[in-house]
Image (cartoon, rainbow, N blue to C red):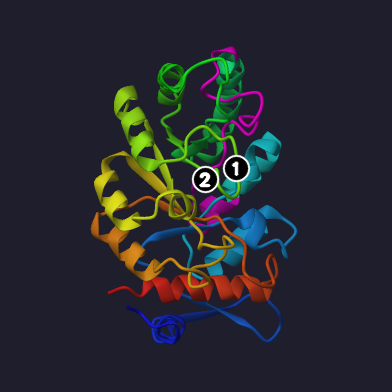
Amino acid sequence: MIKRREFLTGGAVALAGISTVSKFAGKTSAAVKHSFKLKYAPHASGLVRYIKNMPDRLDECASYGFKAFEYNGLAGDTHKQAEELKKRMDKLGMEMGVFTANPNGWKKTGLVNPEQRSAFLDELKRSMTYVDITQNKFVTIITGSGYEKATRGEQIANLIDTLRYASDIAERHNVTLCVEPLNVLVDHPGYFLSYSDEAYQILKGVNRQNIKMLFDIYHQQIMEGNLINNIRKFQDEISTFHVGDNPGRHEPGSGEINYRNVFKAIYEIGHKGFLGLEFSASSDNGKPEGFKKVVQSIVDADNFL
C-alpha cells in the first residue's frame, strides 16, 4: 500500500527535466517539462482558464510536457476558430483527444430513443466538420437518458442500431466514436449507460471497429470499482480513458483511487491512446497554481516504474 506522503513526494525526482519559462504562470515560476509514460491530455477549457485564448492554452500545456489536450467545447466554436486551433496544434506537435460530438444528447440527441435518431445523426454529421479540420481520431458520444416507452432490452437494441448508423458516418471521416458510461449516483441521474460490462456487451453487439468505449475512471469507481480488473478484462473495447479522483472529481492523489497502480495497469496493457484529465483542481481551479498542482499530481502518479 502506498502511503500518502510517499505518493505526494515520490515524483519529486521524476519531475526533474527541462525548465521552460511560462509567460502565463507568473514572473517567478517556471514550467518543468516532463516526459510522461502515457498520453495525458489536460482539459484546457477548464484547467487552464487563466489564459483567455484557447490556442495559447495549448502553449501552456506543452510547456509542462503534455503532448495532447482535450476541449469539449470545440463544436461550439466557429470553423475559423477550429482552424486557428489546428494551426497551433501543428506548431506545437500536439494531438487533440476527444470532444463531445452530440452535446445535446442529454435531451434531444440521445442514442436509445428512436425518435431522436435522426437528430442525433444530424448533430454527429455537424461535428464531423470539426473533425475534418482538427483531424482528431476520437470523439465522445453520450447515450442520454433512458427511454420510458421501452424495456431496457428494447432500448439496448435501439442503441445498437443507432451506433451502426453512426459507424457508417464516422467511417467516412476516419474517426472512432467513444461511447461513455457515466455514473448515476452522484452526477448524472437517469443516464442510460453506467456500467463498463454492459457497455462491453453492447459494443460486441455493434461489432464495429470504429465504435469503442470511453472508460472514465472516476465514473466507474463510483459505479463499480474493481478498476484494474475491468480495464484488463475489457481492454479490447476501450479506446480512451478519462481521469478524475473520487470523491470530488479532482486530481489524482486527492481521493481514494490509487492512480499510480491504475496508470501502471493501463501502461501494461499497451494503451497508446489518450487519458483525458477531465477534472477540476482541488484548489485554485483554472488558475496557475491549480494547474501546477495538477501537473505535479500526474507526475507523481506517472512514476509507476
Q: Is residue 98 left or right of residue 115?
A: left
**Residue 149 image-quadrant placement:** top right
Q: Is residue 150 above or below residue 289?
A: above
Q: Is residue 255 above or below residue 99?
A: below
**Residue type of the residue flagged with mark 1:** His
Which residue in the structure is indicated by mark 2?
Answer: 183
Residue name at image x 53 percent, y 72 percent: 254
User: Is there any visible trace of residue 207 in the rendered image?
Assistant: no
Residue name at image x 44 percent, y 86 percent: 5
Where residue 36 sits: x, y (%)? 39, 68
Q: Is residue 115 above or below residue 292?
A: above
Magenta region = 88-115
Residue name at image x 28 percent, y 61 percent: 265
Where residue 184 sits: x, y (%)? 55, 43
Query: Looking at the rendered structure, which numbered label has been put on residue 188?
Result: 1
Q: Is the Cβ of the residue at disc 2 closer than 8 Å to that at disc 1?
A: yes
Assign the N terminus to one quadrant of the image: bottom left
User: Is there any visible trace of residue 224 in the rendered image?
Assistant: yes
Q: Is residue 249 above or below residue 15?
A: above
